[in-house]
Image: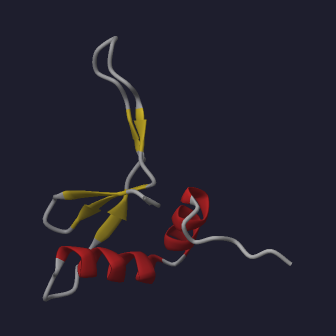
Amino acid sequence: MESLKPTSDIVFKMFLLRRQELLRHMVEAVLGRSSPLRELTVLNPSIPKECPGDKEIVLDIRVRLDDGSEVDLEMQTT
């Protein structure tokens, strides 16, 4: 049986969204936070284009932190 690869965008996204504690720990580690996040809100990952020539962006995971800042997470394999 073939296993799912964690470097696949959909597996990365589903794993972290279904296990919010892992998402929280990952964001804290990447940001080098010394204190735990009080709140982490998953936002709509779509960023609509603002001008006709712009490209619409769909992120893997987009979250708002307790201080109001936003973090965009993307799986990159290269």
Which corner quadrant holds the N terminus?
Answer: bottom right
Residue 6 occupies quadrant: bottom right
Q: How many marks?
A: 0
Return the residue nearer the eye: 15 or 44.
15
Give residue 74's position: percent from left, percent from top: 40, 57
Residue 29 occupies quadrant: bottom left
Return the residue nearer the eye: 67 or 70.
70
Give residue 28's position: percent from left, percent from top: 25, 79
Q: Is residue 35 above or below residue 62?
A: below
Q: Residue at x 15, y 88 (%)?
A: 35
Residue 31 occupies quadrant: bottom left
Give residue 34's position: percent from left, percent from top: 13, 88
Return the residue nearer the eye: 44 or 7.
7
Q: Residue at x 43, y 81 (%)?
A: 22
Q: Is residue 12 above or below residue 30?
A: above
Give residue 70's position: percent from left, percent from top: 23, 56
| 27 horizontally vs 2: left or right | left
Q: Is residue 9 above or below residue 15?
A: above
| 25 horizontally vs 16: left or right | left
